[in-house]
């Protein structure tokens, strides 16, 4: 491909990104024994958690703002391209079975659409118009949160998604792995986790991808804790959609209540398999209908419902 002014400008821009930097000390890594390469890679990965730790105040602020809006009925939307987009879709897809979130409550948008989950869609990350269309289709409200995810922090799809979401009044978060990124500048809450140059130059599916996964885990998990989707560290809103999860639901009820198997089965049967309701029945002695009402009045927070049951 012949050089063009636009291509030259992009090359110059990438040259200044930490995630694109070349590590001369690894120039002969292909000559090393496999164990040595694995050792280097493992040492690299061990630095990611510390990089995330350095951004915990920014992460916590973004989560609190997100949870406040979701408590009013808002949605959590991830938008990214390539690895970043796939990580967002992964996190969104795991919220319904883990936290019984309603369909469409946590959404993952990836540049190029569903096809891009399995194969690279050429040019998708540069398609700002597609990002605008994807956001417009959601009909954003001020109670929604849009998290743009991009290792470089310059991906047009992610930056445009955040820019359009902010213009629509939604809360915006920019998750990247470079300081002073365009994505961070566009967002209400910039989260810039600088993990340094990659083992393979520019391969941001490595440390940058790991960092993004860790932060997305925090955003969804802690937001759901704030929304009352857990009781302590128990997933009491778990949706038992397969044999493993049905067994896990019984274990959760047992851990929360100390009840025997017969009591657990009776409570789950009475509450239609709802773990949170069954725990409330067993701990407070109310019937299934009352448990449902108390939880509704408590906004789904089991601790608050238990307190209300004790005051009856």
Image: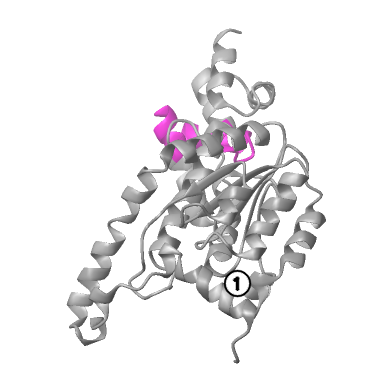
Residue 80 in the image: above or below residue 290: below
Q: Residue at x 49, y 35 (%)?
A: 264
Give left or right: position of 307 versus 295: left
- Is 236 in front, or is 50? 50
Residue reaching furthest top? 311
Numbered range of the magenta stretch: 252-276
Q: Residue at x 56, y 65 (%)?
A: 86
On the question of residue 234 being in view, the answer is no
- Is 205 in front, or is 158? 158
Residue density around tag 1, few if under 14, some if 14–19, many if 20 or more, within 10 Å = some
Q: Residue at x 48, y 36 (%)?
A: 60
Whether 263 is among the magenta residues is: yes
Instruction: Give the image location of residue 143, x and y in percent.
Output: 72, 37
Quarter of the N terminus within the rendering:
bottom right
- Is 114 in front, or is 211? 211
Please name the residue that numbered disc 1 is placed on.
Answer: 117
């Amino acid at each position: 491909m012949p050089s063009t002014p636009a291509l030259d400008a992009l090359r110059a821009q990438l040259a200044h990104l930490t995630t694109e930097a070349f590590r001369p000390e690894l120039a002969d890594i292909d000559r090393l024994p496999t164990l040595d390469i694995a050792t280097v890679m493992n040492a690299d990965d061990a630095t990611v958690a510390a990089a995330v730790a350095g951004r915990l105040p920014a992460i916590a602020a973004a989560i609190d703002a997100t949870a406040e809006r979701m408590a009013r009925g808002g949605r959590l939307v991830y938008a990214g391209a390539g690895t970043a987009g796939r990580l967002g879709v992964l996190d969104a897809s795991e919220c319904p079975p883990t936290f019984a979130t309603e369909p469409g409550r946590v959404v993952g948008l990836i540049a190029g659409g569903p096809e891009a989950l399995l194969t690279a869609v050429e040019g998708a990350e540069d398609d700002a118009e597609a990002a605008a269309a994807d956001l417009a289709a959601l009909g954003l409200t001020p109670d929604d949160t849009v998290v743009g995810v991009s290792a470089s922090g310059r991906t047009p799809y992610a930056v445009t998604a955040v820019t359009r979401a902010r213009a629509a009044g939604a809360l915006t978060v920019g998750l990247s792995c470079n300081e002073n990124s365009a994505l961070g500048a566009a967002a209400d809450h910039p989260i810039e986790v600088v993990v340094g140059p990659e083992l393979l130059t520019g391969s941001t599916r490595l440390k940058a991808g790991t960092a993004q996964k860790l932060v997305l885990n925090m955003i969804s998990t802690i937001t759901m804790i704030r929304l009352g989707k857990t009781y302590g560290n128990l997933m009491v809103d778990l949706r038992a959609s397969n044999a493993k999860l049905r067994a896990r639901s019984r274990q959760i009820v047992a851990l929360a209540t100390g009840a025997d198997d017969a009591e657990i089965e009776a409570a789950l049967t009475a509450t239609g398999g709802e773990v949170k309701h069954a725990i409330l029945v067993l701990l407070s002695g109310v019937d299934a209908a009352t448990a449902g009402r108390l939880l509704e009045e408590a906004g789904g927070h089991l601790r608050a419902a238990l307190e209300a049951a004790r005051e009856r």
